[in-house]
Amino acid sequence: MAESKVTGIIKSLNALEDDLDSLNSKVSDMKKQLSVKTQSEIDTLLEKTREMATKEAEVIINASKEKATAESAKISQDGETKLSEIQSNIDANFDEAVKHVVSTVLKA
């Protein structure tokens, strides 16, 4: 009778060991699946982050381009205004400059 109890205990322990091995195998499979899922999620988030960064960069670049275009137009307009002022000064003082040059040449 004692032998049958020992045999029963051994069989129970063997069954528990088999159950533990099965659970370990399942846990290992779940770890692999979790790792694959995690990597997939990381890749998805990385792609979304890149898209967001690209859109934000485009907004910043377009804003900078518009600002540079506006500044360029202002600089060009200021240059035109200064050129017009210089041309007006030349036209206004041309006769006087010619008289001065002629006077200087005649004195020499």
Image (tube, grey):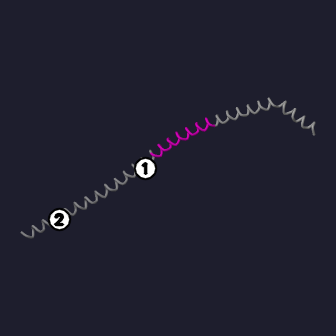
Q: On the picture, is 59 further left or further right than 83?
A: left
Q: Which SS does the magenta portion mostly show?
A: helix
Is residue 9 magenta-colored? Answer: no
Q: Residue at x 47, y 46 (%)?
A: 50
In the rendered image, the quadrant that contains the C terminus is top right
Question: As shown in the figure, which amino acid type bears the numbered disc 2?
Answer: Leu
Q: Residue furthest bottom?
A: 3
Taking depth in this image into account, of 65 and 72 the one nearest to the observer is 72
| Residue at disc 2, secondary structure | helix
Residue 13 numbered mark, or none: 2
- Quadrant for the N terminus, please: bottom left
Q: Which residues are magenta?
A: 49-71
Q: Left or right: 76 with respect to 51?
A: right
Q: Is residue 11 above or below residue 66?
A: below
**Which sits in the foreground, 75 or 63?**
75
**Residue 65: percent from left, percent from top:** 58, 39
Tag of residue 91: none
Q: Which residue is identified by label 1?
A: 43
The part of the image, by quadrant, that contains residue 92 is top right
Magenta stretch contains residue 70: yes
Q: Position of residue 14 (x, y in %)?
A: 19, 65
In-image side of 106 versus 82 (left or right): right
